Amino acid sequence: MKIFTASQIYDADKFTISKQQIKSDDLMERAATALFNWIHSRLNGAQVNIKLFCGIGNNGGDGIALARLLQEHGYSISVFVVNYSEKRSKDFLINLDRLKDRKLWPEFLDSDCSFPDINQNDIIVDAIFGIGLNRKLDDWVGNLIKHINVSNAFVLSVDIPSGLPMDSNPSDSSYVIRASHVLSFQVPKLIFFLPETGIYQNQWEVLDIGLDPEYLNSTNTEYQLIGKNEILPLYRPRLKFSHKGNYGHAVIIGGSYGKIGAVQLACSACLSVGSGLVTAYVPECGYNALQTALPEAMVLTDDEDDSITKINVPFVPSVYGIGMGMGTEEKTIKAFGTFLKNVESPLVIDADGLNILAKHPSLLKDVPKGSVLTPHPKELQRLIGEWEDDFDKLNKAKDFSVKNNCILVIKGAHSIVIHAEKGYINNTGNPGMATAGSGDVLTGMITGLISQGYSPLNAAIFGVYLHGMAGDVGVMDFGYEALKATEIINNIGKAYIELLRPPKPENVKEV
Ligand SMILES: NC(=O)C1=CN([C@@H]2O[C@H](COP(=O)(O)OP(=O)(O)OC[C@H]3O[C@@H](n4cnc5c(N)ncnc54)[C@H](OP(=O)(O)O)[C@@H]3O)[C@@H](O)[C@H]2O)[C@H](O)CC1
Ligand SMILES: [K+]
């Protein structure tokens, strides 16, 4: 699903209004009707108090139009206009008149008013600001938002949580609505997926308001949200008359004394994701452990017992995964540098491989083009430097990807695959996956996908998705806390099955 910027959304509005020959208040009516249907299908007329806080722009207009529809259906509502500016939008005013025609007079709030009481059993509709926020809030508006936030009432935000800008962090985090649920129009917003701005909402959902498909389909976006629809076309089915040689030979290099488990996890994930053959390259001390724990993998060892000192693989594999548990000893750094000078197969680089690159950036030029780097936030910072906020981080990551001709997987709650100017945002996974070895599993999976013939970019996007899905399936049996990296591996097969499961026909209930 494409993720549009605010200016693209405004363009989509204009395009839709002109192509479909509708008026802008018709579009607002669609938005309000979609909001109303969502609420009505859940409340079924329940007599709970709904308090609508509406700004004076189009987000406020949506709220005012929603108030009319709720009133027409007998809901108990109170409407407050947050009167933060004299510049009211045309469609806000049209809908305000329609409300007044029905003898419903909102209460106008300004800097001199005391705020209305909010009971924690009330439902709050937050339609104060939408995507048009462009400066710091006046303190009294910020204080109203604080007043709503401390009420513990259920807060339904219209389009986005009020007070949250679309392309930067809020200047004061206490002046942002903490939404229980966001009903966002037509497309998800980038701010839902970034660690610093995603915290303002508990859940989000997209409501279709019929923006014109021609605009939506033909417009390029920097970011895309990756779900099943985007992943299925990437899937490469296994052929009936194929053999293990068709699915590549991956080599996983890493480990040091006490950290052989990282390599075992990566190799096991690489096999489970479907690589034809997997060889581990580890220090001598890892030999027995690996041969015992993972009989399907072959093992090559370094001459040294405790760490990697030279990388000698006597064949050309389909792909290398390198770095997990490898350490950053001088001897290992030297071996890694020599390896990079000679290697031609694509690489998936993780953990200490990344730490070495960060400490010795001159090595970056030897990394084969199109390699995949999988940093967690700390490793990313070492690679690209400090960032001001998540938006700056993404821009720096894109620059790094362009400069070094590589793919970056920024790991997090919503991992983002960066390839040049584009970002692919993952939407599977859960907090149970924040556990030791989870990253080694991901590296093994991406390596195993490249081994089978997926392009490095597709392997990164597909691997991140499947890794999250395996965690989502695993969490059903283990819960968040007990989910270990091994359980993620054990559920890779079920993740594939889940991916390929045909959608359930609508209105059919499982018995
Ligand atoms: N296609 C869609 O998704 C549709 C969305 N709709 C809804 O429209 C809003 C966006 O509406 P807009 O009127 O552009 O913006 P807001 O309602 O968010 O803000 C209103 C104006 O407030 C001014 N502003 C901005 N920041 C501040 C501030 N800190 N303090 C005071 N005032 C501020 C600004 O105007 P200025 O001229 O003063 O700069 C804003 O324009 C979208 O989110 C949806 O809810 C449509 O209803 C249907 C199509
Ligand atoms: K809002």
Image: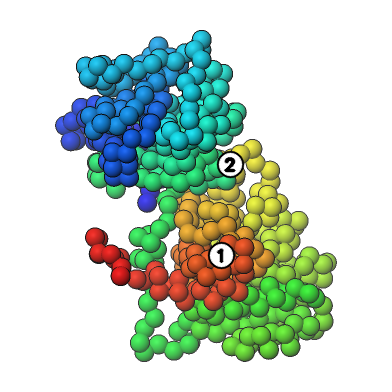
* Quarter of image, res 227: bottom left
Q: Which residue is mark 2?
A: 196
Q: Give the label, 1 or 2, closer to the camera.
A: 1
In the figure, is residue 167 to the left or right of 57?
right
Q: Position of residue 314 (x, y in %)?
A: 66, 85
Q: Position of residue 511 (x, y in %)?
A: 30, 70
At x 32% / y 29%, what residue is drawn? 76
At x 49% / y 64%, what residue is drawn? 472
Q: Is residue 501 above or below residue 143?
A: below
At x 24% / y 60%, what residue is drawn? 507
In the displayed orientation, state which residue is furthest to the front. 47
* Type of amino acid under label 1: Gly
Q: Position of residue 165 (x, y in %)?
A: 50, 32
* Quarter of image, res 255: bottom right
Q: Is residue 80 above or below residue 494?
A: above
Q: Which residue is mark 1?
A: 479
For ligand 1, the image quadrant comes to top left
In the figure, is residue 433 to the left or right of 125?
right
Neighbor class of circle 1 (other Cα within 10 Å; few <14, some 14-19, many 20+) is few
Q: Position of residue 238 (x, y in %)?
A: 39, 81
Depth order, front residue of 440/220? 440
At x 39% / y 36%, what residue is drawn? 159
Residue 124 in view in this figure: yes
